[in-house]
């Protein structure tokens, strides 16, 4: 599933980029503007063809795409015959629509996928009340059968079975599987051993008493957490799941057309909120990225992930949640890109939108006080700020790539 997942991710990402740029192009043309280039990629031209006044093609560096709209900025010369069609001559409303069209397309893609999935596959649900979905044979984070060096599953040794419903851990009533201090995960991991500098346990795991219900009967057992291997090297260990149980898998149900459509819009809102939160958290998570590239400890699940990491996770998404889950995954990526692109920073579309609004506001104020039109913002003065942002963005992208390659996230992190 790995290679297939990567291929599907690349196809979906390229399609999203092409639709993003098509949104700009269609809006500019509707406004009467002139679009001279529509390319996927940057740098040297690999292949192209011309239709009408626009050249379409592919360039060598696969880092996005662009459309060239005459008069988008005043940093390049305009032929006299194109001056009436220059973008900066268009009404403010058309300019704002054209500039935001790329992000609007991403939002439309996300909403379409989030409506398509529940209407086609159904609505995803998962029992997170404390029911055991799977008791593993051993402790490991790699794929494949248990190996002789893998630690045995403490949950299996304690006679837990699939379908058992955990109700208390050490006498504390369980509220959910993983949310909050009284969750199954939190309570079971209170006794996990600490690791020393050499990545080996420095304390013994603390046994936990678990009360569960099976076939209507209540039972109590004691589980002693263990330490699971994270690679072929038995000296490398982690503090993760050391019990050997997993929550039930996601299931798909069809609750009806109205509920399915409502679920799509609700998920759209949740993805939007999550994308904004993720953007806000990026600066604080950069130290975790440096740690991920220099340490052999498992990468923090809340660290940012780059394009390489997202591609590598796709196979796990499909294997765990099917192609419906894959479409949710692509929808969440489109949502993030759409919101990120609206940040009021050059050279992002949001930066051009901010300039257009600033120019319009400044023009209205000047007119109200009987002053002459102050004209357009001098973009040359903003180039240092735009270049600084671009350098930081490229640096973050390279750091993400390094972390994705040297210490990749493992699904379902």
Image (spheres, rainbow, N blue to C red):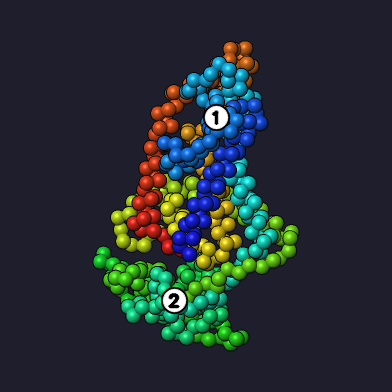
| Residue 356: quarter of image | top right
| Residue 404: quarter of image | bottom left
- Residue ID for mark 2: 244
Q: Residues within 10 Å of mark 1 (few under 14, many from 20)?
A: some
Left/right placement of residue 373 relative to residue 238 reads right
- The answer to whether residue 361 is visible is no
Numbered badge on residue 36: 1
Toward the viewer: 285 or 316? 316
Does label 2 or label 1 sit earlier along the sequence?
Answer: 1
Q: Position of residue 138 (x, y in %)?
A: 41, 78
Check disc 2 and report its element: helix, strand or loop.
Answer: loop
Numbered badge on residue 242: none
Q: Position of residue 134 (x, y in %)?
A: 51, 77
Q: How many marks?
A: 2
Q: What is the spatial separation of the Cα atoms under label 2 and label 1, in whole angstroms?
A: 59 Å
Left/right placement of residue 259 relative to residue 351 reads right
Residue beneath the point at 55% across and 26% down: 70
Q: Position of residue 69 (x, y in %)?
A: 55, 29
Compared to residue 39, the image places residue 145 above or below, namely below
Toward the viewer: 330 or 385? 330
Q: Position of residue 58 (x, y in %)?
A: 48, 40
- The answer to whether residue 216 is visible is yes
Check disc 1 and report its element: helix, strand or loop.
Answer: strand
Q: Nearer the viewer, mark 2 or mark 1?
A: 1
Residue beneath the point at 58% across and 43% down: 19
Toward the viewer: 62 or 192? 62
Residue beneath the point at 60% across and 30% down: 52
Compared to residue 410, the image places residue 388 above or below, namely above
| Residue 294: quarter of image | bottom left
Q: Residues within 10 Å of mark 2 (few under 14, many from 20)?
A: many
Residue beneath the point at 55% across and 33% down: 50
């Amino acid at each position: 599933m790995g290679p297939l997942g990567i291929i599907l991710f690349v196809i979906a990402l390229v399609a999203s980029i092409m639709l993003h740029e098509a949104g700009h192009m269609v809006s500019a043309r509707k406004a009467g503007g002139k679009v001279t280039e529509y390319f996927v990629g940057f740098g040297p031209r690999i292949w192209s063809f011309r239709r009408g006044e626009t050249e379409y093609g592919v360039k060598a560096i696969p880092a996005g795409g662009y459309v060239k709209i005459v008069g988008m900025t005043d940093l390049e010369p305009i032929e006299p015959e194109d001056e009436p069609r220059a973008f900066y001559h268009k009404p403010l409303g058309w300019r704002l629509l054209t500039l935001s069209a790329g992000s609007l397309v991403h939002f439309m893609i996300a909403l379409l996928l989030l409506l398509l999935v529940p209407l086609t596959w159904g609505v995803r649900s998962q029992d997170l009340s404390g029911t055991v979905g799977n008791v593993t044979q051993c402790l490991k984070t790699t794929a494949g059968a248990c190996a002789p060096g893998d630690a045995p599953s403490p949950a299996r040794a304690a006679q837990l079975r699939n379908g058992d419903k955990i109700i208390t851990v050490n006498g504390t009533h369980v509220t959910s599987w993983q949310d909050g201090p009284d969750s199954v995960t939190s309570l079971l991991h209170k006794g996990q051993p600490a690791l020393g500098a050499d990545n080996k346990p420095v304390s013994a795991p603390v046994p936990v008493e678990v009360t569960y219900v099976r076939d209507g009967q209540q039972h109590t057992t004691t589980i002693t957490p263990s330490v699971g291997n994270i690679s072929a090297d038995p000296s490398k260990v982690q503090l993760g799941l050391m019990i050997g149980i997993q929550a039930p898998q996601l299931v798909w149900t069809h609750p009806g057309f109205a509920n399915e459509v409502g679920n799509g819009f609700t998920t759209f809102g949740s993805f939007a909120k999550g994308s904004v939160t993720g953007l806000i958290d990026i600066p604080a998570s950069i130290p975790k990225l440096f740690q991920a590239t220099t340490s052999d400890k498992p990468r923090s699940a809340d660290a940012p992930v780059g394009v390489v990491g997202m591609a590598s996770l796709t196979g796990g998404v499909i294997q765990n949640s099917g192609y419906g889950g894959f479409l949710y995954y692509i929808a969440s990526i489109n949502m993030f890109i759409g919101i990120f692109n609206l940040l009021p920073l050059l050279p992002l579309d949001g930066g051009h939108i901010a300039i257009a609004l600033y120019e319009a506001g400044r023009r209205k104020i000047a007119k109200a006080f009987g002053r002459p039109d102050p004209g357009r913002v001098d973009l040359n003065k903003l180039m240092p700020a735009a270049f600084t942002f671009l350098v930081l963005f490229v640096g973050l992208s390279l750091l993400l790539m390094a972390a994705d390659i040297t210490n990749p996230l493992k699904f379902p992190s």
